[in-house]
Image (cartoon, grey):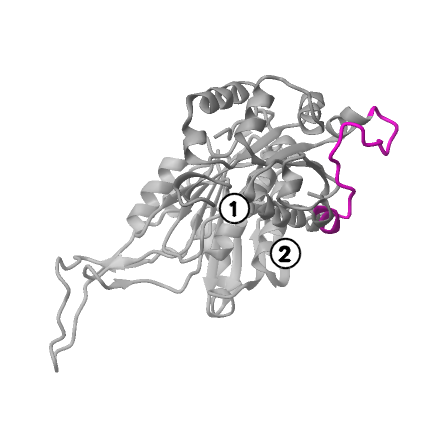
Amino acid sequence: MEATRIVLGVCGSIAAYKVAELARNLTLAGAQVDVVMTEAASRFVGAATFQALTGRPVRTSLWDLPEDGVVGHVSLGVHADLVVIAPATADAIARLAAGMADDLLTTTVLATSAPVMLAPAMNPAMWHHPATQANLATLRRRGVIVLEPAYGRMAEPVIGQGRLPEPAIIEAEARALLGRRRGALRGRRVVISAGGTHEPIDPVRFIGNRASGRMGFALAVAARDQGASVHLIAGATSEPPPSAVDVVRVATAVQMQQAVLAALDGADLLIMNAAVADYRPAQAAEAKLKKRRGAPLQLTLVENPDILGELAARRDLLKIGFAAETHDLLQHARDKLERKGLDAIVANDALASIGSADIALTVLDDRGALTFERMPKERAAAQLVAWTVARWPERLAPVERGVHERSR
């Protein structure tokens, strides 16, 4: 987001108040956010709100004087890196599809060569109306990114599809779109596993671990923001998965194996962060096991598949594993690196990192070891992805495939 110029168009909808959070978050992330409000939008939220949150003057009129000497009604579009319209009303969508330029927002869109993303919000009947859908189809053909509105209760006593997507979702899609335009991993396919696995004992009990999935999810976000097409295999976790990535939910180690192998077609990089159980019960009971007083419960465990071990011969795929250990950390990590034919392994203290918001890492490969000080997992993930790109610049060099591939 640093040094990125984003035009944030706000249209007349009760959902306009939610966009204040989006403007604030994009600004805090380092973007220069220029808010363009339609006349109708100003009836729902004041321009002073957006000016206070962005530190930038809010534009409302075609006749606003430009700051840089460029013709005022095209200046914002010419310099934008991204145009986001949220909420995008049925009226705004219709005028954009018709190519109209009767206010500053529509003129800005016509004048820009930057990607344009719409976050619609309207009454469900208006959303599903054939005219609206036809207008959206026209815009999609032109390369405009259209986010699907959420389903739920509207301002009026109606339930249906038409709610503005949450600001966090819009921000994630914006980050992904910018990444596909200029990120270090643009055009690359990255597969990431996260979370633990639950191996069933009976219908209500399982063998598992305390993995939260937070580090794996943070890695997915970091790779997404660098432009990668991210395929996230999420095991057992209570963490909400990140937006703007493809997510497959699994529960057991066998399911994790199947999902990872299915996702590897055409992949450039695999990061196995998931805490996959080494063993599972040989037979899961069909009904809940009852306690028998004075009698021990004996379980026969069998070995789970070694997902990374089975990929040891794959030299066309960069493979990074994780080693969470309670003792002899680097020794166990180095052994796993060599035994499983990995390109690198990330070692961390299991007792200090599992379930925690912070993590300290040591990355080992054939060149040696590099230690990352303890930091939030989101920051550590970003640094680890940056290290990976720098470590294999030829194999992970950007591939130009366009910026509109996630049009939804």
In the image, 318: left or right of 54?
Answer: left
Q: Which residue is mark 1?
A: 166
Return the residue nearer the eye: 153 or 21: 153
Of the image marks 1 and 2, the number of the one nearer the N terminus: 1
Q: Residue 304, percent across and down?
A: 29, 53
The segment highlighted magenta reads 50-71
- Quarter occupied by residue 200: bottom left
Work out whether residue 41 can be spotted.
yes
Residue 17, numbered label: none
Q: Residue furthest bottom?
A: 294
Identify the residue shown where x is 14% and y is 60%: 285
Work out whether residue 223 can be spotted.
no
Q: Residue 4, percent across and down?
A: 72, 38
Q: Is residue 52 magenta?
A: yes
Name the element at disc 1: loop
Dot 1 amino acid type: Glu
Task: Locate the N terminus by quadrant.
Answer: top right
Return the residue nearer the eye: 211 or 85: 85
Q: Which residue is mark 2?
A: 370
Return the residue nearer the eye: 156 or 142: 156
- Quarter occupied by residue 178: top right
Dot 2 amino acid type: Leu
Q: Is residue 367 magenta?
A: no
- Please tell me whether mark 1 or mark 2 is closer to you in this view: 1
Residue 17, above or below 87 = below
